[in-house]
Amino acid sequence: MAKETKAKTSAKPASKAAKVVKKKKLKLTSPKVMVNIRSTYNNTIISICDYEGNVISQSSCGKVGFIGSKKSTAYAATKAGEDAAGKAVTAGAREAEVVIRGIGVGRQAAVKGIRSGGLRITLLTDKTPVPHGGCKPRRAPKK
């Protein structure tokens, strides 16, 4: 008996309609932001966030519209930097600390695009990961 009443009370009619949740646009409290540039041989990814880690804007060479081998050019990185910086400026960003990671053609070009996009760069840091010791060498072939 107890199982039957429990099953009846837990079944609720699904009459509520699903609510559409809109995401609020991020308003900056501080005009200072951090810009992270990840530059590889194939693409350059730029993300702009505040000091709490909330992403304000992001862009990449592929997002701007370049495809294939054109994504790995300096011009594409400049356009991606301008796109990301323009979105951040409309959100209220004024000054930026730039952190560059990786080796690629778009390193300096992305910084140039961020500057031309309207952000004032106060600090420029290179945090490219460098191996210490590297991988273990392959074994010698048998004779």
Image (tube, grey):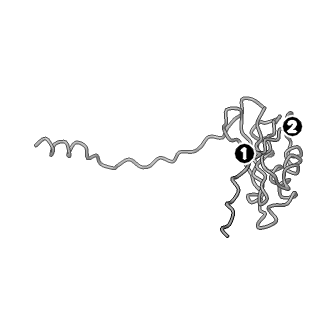
Between 44 and 84, the one lying in front of the other is 44
Between 103 and 81, the one lying in front of the other is 103
Q: Measuring 74% from the left and 39% from the top, which residue is drawn there? A: 91
Q: Secondary structure at mark 1?
A: strand
Q: Measuring 84% from the left and 50% from the top, which residue is drawn there? A: 107
**Residue furthest toward the front?**
143
**Residue furthest toward the top?**
30
**Residue furthest toward the bottom?**
143
* Amino acid residing under circle 2: Ile
Of labels 2 and 1, the one closer to you: 2
- Per the image, the residue denoted by label 1 is 57
Q: Measuring 25% from the left and 43% from the top, which residue is drawn there? A: 10
Lateral position of residue 69 relative to residue 26, left or right:
right
**Residue furthest toward the left?**
1
Above or below for 32 versus 139: above
Tag shown at residue 121:
2
Q: Secondary structure at mark 2?
A: strand
Between 133 and 30, the one lying in front of the other is 133
Above or below for 63 versus 36: below
